[in-house]
Image: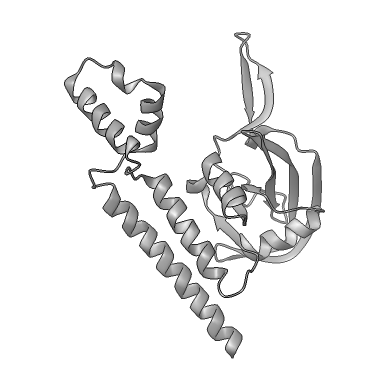
Amino acid sequence: MLLTVITRLIRLQLMKMASDYIWLIQEFTAEPQFVSQKELELFHKGELQKSEDPSPQERTEIIRQLVEADEYINTSTVTKEQLQKTSQAFKQPDDVELTHVLDAGFDSNDVFAFIDKELEDEFVIRLKISRNSNETYIDDKAKEKYVKIVNTEFANKERFPIQKVQIKGKNYQQASCLIEYDDITFEKETYTVVRITVNDRKGQKIFKESPRLLTNRKIETAGSWYLFNLSKTF
């Protein structure tokens, strides 16, 4: 009974934090202190200042003042604030191990490093289909390009039979799951990328695009990831 109550309280807390996050994003985007991540990157590159139009010049000055005073806000600062609140809330009163399970909207090197290095928590984050691997190739114009993670080869792989699994409300019997994983480096930090392909009894892919997940969790075998993924991600 006590465990059920605690579980419900945790779910309510997560729902409240998610609701607060959405509300904060909606509110902050209308604030004069809001500076999008793209604007911030252009500002630091000096590209906003190059325009002759008076409007970008005025915006550049506003951003400069906000940056110097460290008073700007954007989705990155709000995300970090909410992640930190979540981490602190679940670590009190005991110092517990915490894993942040996040969707592709949080696919960001900045978010990876913040959770891993500053919060010292674990994470499992779905990667965008556009995310590149460390592999490169030479295209027909003799230019070096990165291979998308969705198309790359993984060093480790193992297939498991699944007698029965429910995905998005639909039951599948005699399915199979292919787990592929390998190390990958983003901005000098090494994590583990996992690709999951689930097939039905006829061998057809259940997901149109195989989910690609990034984690700083230690994965010793594909089997350990398989159990964690089925219980937490699906």
Horizontal relation, residue 58 to residue 4: left or right: left
Mark yes or no: residue 175 visible.
Answer: no
State the residue lying farthest toward the front.
69
Quarter of the figure with residue 102:
bottom right
State the residue lying farthest toward the top.
141
At 35% from the left and 20% from the top, the residue drawn is 47
At 40% from the left and 69% from the top, the residue drawn is 16
- Quarter of the image where the C terminus is located: bottom right
At 72% from the left and 52% from the top, the residue drawn is 202
**Looking at the picture, does residue 201 appear above or below residue 38?**
below
Horizontal relation, residue 60 to residue 94: left or right: left
| Residue 191 on image: x %, y % | 68, 43
| Residue 48 on image: x %, y % | 31, 23
| Residue 155 on image: x %, y % | 80, 38
**Looking at the picture, does residue 46 appear above or below residue 180?**
above
State the residue lying farthest toward the left.
54
At 74% from the left and 44% from the top, the residue drawn is 181
**Looking at the picture, does residue 135 appear above or below residue 33?**
above
Horizontal relation, residue 69 to residue 126: left or right: left
| Residue 154 on image: x %, y % | 76, 38
Q: Nearer the viewer, residue 126 or 21?
A: 21
Q: Nearer the viewer, residue 131 or 99?
A: 99
Horizontal relation, residue 112 to residue 59: left or right: right
**Looking at the picture, does residue 104 appear above or below residue 7?**
above
Q: Nearer the viewer, residue 205 or 60?
A: 60
